[in-house]
Image (spheres, rainbow, N blue to C red):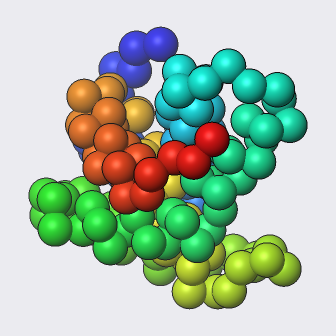
Amino acid sequence: MENNLSEREVNQYSPLTLAFLGDSVYEVLVRRKILMAANLPTAKLHNIKIRKVCAAYQSSAVDVILPLLSEKEEAVLKRGRNATGNTVPKHSNAVEYRRATALECLFGYLYLLNKNERIDELFQVIWDMEELVI
């Protein structure tokens, strides 16, 4: 799917709206990576996916990619982190959840700008944070 939005148009979306989209972008990348690594029963695939999409993992990913971000990308990340309205799930804390939302906001932003190479570049760094144990 090709997006033809300008940066100005993308910046008009709220950080939580960008995170809503970015959550699915990130999860599809995780699912694709896991699937390419091994042909496993769906229950096992799901358990592996959960480790990579949880707020704690995504929060750690923010620390890893932060030095690689441009000023604009870092500003988007901060907008996502500071967004209000997040309800924190039972299995996470508020700091981790806000940082995970920030990561998802960045992925949504990049997706709407059709910056797929940048998404893949950042995702690979995140993926390489931890060896996949199958």
Q: Is residue 21 visible?
A: no
- The reply, left or right, for residue 60 in relation to residue 40 is left
The answer to which image quadrant residue 78 occupies is bottom left
Name the residue rendered at 82%, 26% in the picture.
Answer: 41
Q: Nearer the viewer, residue 48 or 86?
A: 48
Q: Is residue 88 above or below residue 40?
A: below
Across and down, in percent, residue 84 comes to: 61, 78
Residue 31 showing in the rendered view = yes
In this image, 40 relative to 9: left or right? right
Residue 53 x %, y %: 62, 54
Spot the residue most to the front: 134
Of residue 31 and residue 89, the one placed in the foreground of this image is 31
- Residue 109 is situated, as x and y percent measured from the top left of the image, at 39, 45
Kindly identify the residue that appears in the image at 32 percent across and 73 percent down.
Answer: 63
**Where residue 102 sits in the image (x, y, percent)?**
46, 66
| Residue drawn at point x = 46 percent, y = 44 percent | 108
Q: Specify whether 74 is left or right of 111.
A: left
Residue projecting furthest to the bottom: 94
